[in-house]
Image (cartoon, helix red, strand yellow):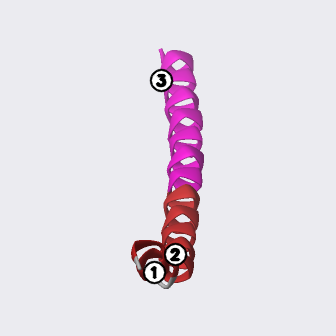
Amino acid sequence: MLLVEYIRMTEYNTQQSQLSKVLHTIKQCIVLNKILVSTTTTTTKPLIPNKLG
């Protein structure tokens, strides 16, 4: 009985660590996305009026 609980706990812990890793990578992707969006918007903003004009 104790062994089963231990296995469940270790499985839960590994799932939690995997989940935290996934969440961390998602956060990194979001940050990178924000950086890319901010740089692209700042670089394309001056180009848009030139295209229209």
**CA separation in Å, label 2 and label 1:** 4 Å
- Give the class, few, some or many, for how many residues have Cα within 10 Å of label 3's Cα (few <14, many ≥20): few
Magenta highlight range: 1-26
- Find residue 13 and report its horizontal and vertical position in percent: 54, 39
Q: Give the residue number, with chain letter if any, for mark 2.
A: 44
- Determine whether 7 is above or below 16 in the image: above
Q: Give the residue number, with chain letter if any, for mark 3.
A: 5
**Residue drawn at (50%, 32%) of the image:** 9
- Determine whether 53 is above or below 37 in the image: below
**Residue drawn at (49%, 68%) of the image:** 37
Looking at the picture, tell me which residue is in the foreground, 15 or 3: 15
**Residue drawn at (49%, 32%) of the image:** 12
As for residue 53 lying within the magenta part, the answer is no
- Find residue 50 and report its horizontal and vertical position in percent: 48, 80
Whichever of callouts 3 and 2 sits on the residue coming sooner in the sequence is: 3
SS for callout 2: helix
SS for callout 1: loop
**CA separation in Å, label 3 and label 2:** 57 Å
Residue sticking out furthest to the front: 53
Quadrant of the rendering where the C terminus is positioned: bottom left
Occupied quadrant, residue 29: bottom right
Discs 3/2, front: 2
**Residue drawn at (55%, 72%) of the image:** 40
Residue type, mark 3 in image: Glu
- Give the class, few, some or many, for how many residues have Cα within 10 Å of label 1's Cα (few <14, many ≥20): few
Looking at the picture, tell me which residue is in the foreground, 18 or 36: 36
Residue type, mark 2 in image: Thr
